[in-house]
Amino acid sequence: MTTTRIILWAMLAFAAALFLTPASAQTNRSDAIDAARAEFVELRGTIENDDRENVSELEERLRTLRDEARNRLTAIDRELDAVEARLSALGAPPGEDEPPESEDLAAERAEIVNELARLNGQKTRVNANIIEANDLLARLSAGRIETLYKKLATRGASPVMPAVWRPAFASAKETSNKIGAYFDAWSDTRRDADGLSRSLFFVALALFAAVVIFWPVNRWIMRTFSVAIARHEPTPPRRVLVAGLKMLARAAPGLIGGFIVMETLRAQGILTEEGETPARALWFSLIIYLLVSGFMRGLFSPANPKWRIAPVDAERGKTISFLINAIVLIVGAKILIISILSVAGAAPELMRLIVAIVAIVVSILTFLLCRTQLWRGADSLGFTEAGADGEAPAPQDEPERRPQRWRIVRRIGRVLAVVTIFAALTGYIDLADFLGSRIYYLAIIAAFAWFVRAIIVELAEYLWRRREDGAGALDDESKRRLSNLRFWNGLVANSLLAIAAAPAVLVLAGVPPAAVSDGIRQVLFGFTIGGVQVPSLANILFAILVFIAIMMLTRFAQRSFRDGPFAHSAVDPGVQNSLITLIGYAGLLIAIFAAISTIGFDLSNLALIAGALSVGIGFGLQSIVNNFVSGLILLFERPIKVGDWIVTSSGEGTVKRISVRSTEIETFDRSSIIVPNSELISSTVTNWTHRNKIGRVKIPVGVAYGSDPEKVREILLRCAQEQPHVVRYPEPFVTWQDFGASSLDFDLRAYLDDIGKGLTVRTELRIAIYKAFAEEGIEIPYPQRDVHVKSWPSDREPGTGKS
């Protein structure tokens, strides 16, 4: 009995939760939406009052509110789907002339409609909150950018002023004392001599391992990848790929060795929370230097000139490498020093002085790097074989825009270098640091993108050559297709890399990373403009993939039917082609509807689209729709099929293809006639092979007067019966057409099993008739005329032509 009561109470509790909890949840959600709205109003007032001291906290709070609103929106959408399903289950409400529905059903319908209205109202309010959050975040981001550029335009003390150097030196001395205190504090933790010696031993061992590991890893990568690629003919992508591998060969040991050293320092207690940031800055700067120095080795390739990317001689290559490596080392040193000063709490004057000095030195090196004489002969960046003397490869004939483009890049580099030096000397140190650091990081991004592009292009060309059965000598057509492949691969790779690099470029331009992340999220997951939901990029890409996948399945199905059941059946080839074409049309329609549905478009709105299309058809698409419908009629009714021999007003030939808009006819001269489908439906068409290939040929024959007609008829029938392509039924027959002017005219009419061979059969029959007449002594006359002379000149003798 007790168990039964427990079960009943549990069922009552479940029912109460089922019916009461949603109402309570709806009330709480509505209150939460109103509370969020009130908080948005308060935050807007704070932002409009320019109270932006805690911008990061404001942004974090706005993002939290926006995420909560998105979660509510997801829950509301799920409930809306459930309520709309309930309403659909009730069916359409009765019309004016129909009997009313029952009171219970009407009450349930009214309740569901009210629930829909309430949920849609909540959805509208939540969307308004999301839009408000995005707007406020955009205003904060704009404020950050405005603050940044105002800071860049603010002039401070010039670094050449003594007033800057005195506090900078004082701060440097204080910072050095703090650094010494940091290591003294660490040594105090190792009070005994053995503990200190053991720690120093492990650190020295880690440094030794980091240095020793450099050469084996470097040599392994070079021998495994770079040397294997270098055996092939150098092409522009392969040159960049080899340079990238050299870059990787130098950077990989740095990554491994740096990890060993960092973990050893942590294990020995040298790296505390304060020392972590400078250590990471040192490791990052070292990796960048190894990457750049490795790429310089591939760019100028002093050991193997034919794999040199930049066509400059060895001496200029060494100079360029020295300048670039110096820039990387100086910038890396600045990053390390600034991180140390920031942790040590150094004076701003010291950090600004270091930033100004680095900006001036890097700008001078950049100006020297952009000198025209240093890059003389490298403007075209051509890629040809090197000469026997080992000099740099001569540039190919490239378009004029390429040397012009590199000249413009160098001029811009020189101008920016001069502007940076002037800004640093005149007190605009923040502007000088901004320009110098952005040029530095943009160059790194460009080099990395160049390397990735080379991998993409080389991989695509490798796969193409594998499909073409090897990389042997290419004919002109293969070279043309390879050139097209390289163009489109380059275009796609450039587009993808530009899209991928756009966020980093925006961050370098001063856009807050959080704002860039929000923009990427909106592009990937959709956004709303004026109440219209723009499909997300993810949905669009997925819809494209769905469309491509269904079309590939359709093509596979067409090939399977053509090579499988149809190839091993007695179905007419024209019928096979019609069925395969219909499968293609059906797959295309399914792919279109599936893609549209994937994007999120409501297919119930197709009535509106159909109405718009009807207007378009009425104004200008009649002929297109007419041809399309005519094509469907041709496929279903099949008055003509692929392979039929037809005669139309446009010409005569064999049907090769029936497409959506037109039909292709190949004449016997091997020319193609494109006939609109509507013409084949509305006009008269002669189809020689509509139901079968049997057709009749007619051969007119003339014999001389005096020939035996019965014998002539016998010979003609015998020749026809001996021809293998003449069928037995209907039998061939001979007709005596007329008494001609010079001959007795007969016609031999015979039916062939394949009218497509009519020309050949006519020729063979004429040869047989000619030989048979010759054997039987029957003459084939030619036109003759008898001339009667009524008078003759008196000064000439008749029949002699003499006077």
Image: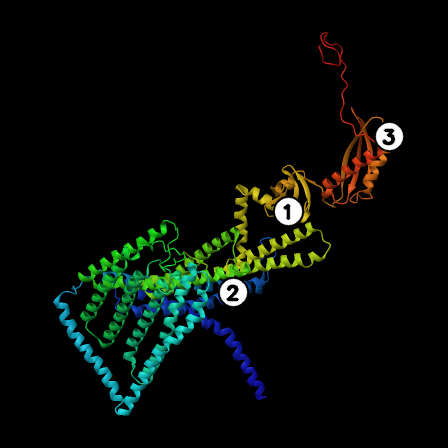
Q: Looking at the image, which residue sits at the far left?
A: 162
Image coordinates for residue 702, horizontal then vertical, percent: 79, 30
In this orientation, which residue lies closer to the viewer: 697 or 564?
697
At label 1, the amino acid type is Lys
* Helix, strand or loop for disc 1: strand
- Say which residue label 1 marks: 656
Please provide percent x and percent y for residue 285: 31, 71
Between marks 3 and 2, how big is the CA–CA gap? Answer: 95 Å
Q: Kindly identify which residue carries mark 3.
A: 708
- Name the spot of residue 52 as percent of width and height, x first: 26, 66
* Residue 546 visible in the displayed image: yes
**Three-letter code, disc 3:** Asp
What residue is pinned by disc 2? 81
Residue 40 to residue 719: above or below? below
x, y percent for residue 342 = 24, 74
Depth check, mark 3 against mark 2: the one in front is: 3
Find numbered disc 3 in the image and state the secondary structure of the residue it sits on. loop
Residue 512 as seen in the image, left or right of residue 644? left
Q: Give the alpha-carbon distance from disc 1 to disc 2, as whole Å.
A: 51 Å
Check disc 3: other Cα within 10 Å, few if <14, some if 14-19, many if 20+.
Answer: few
Q: Is mark 2 on a helix, strand or loop?
A: helix
**315 or 283, nearer to the observer:** 315
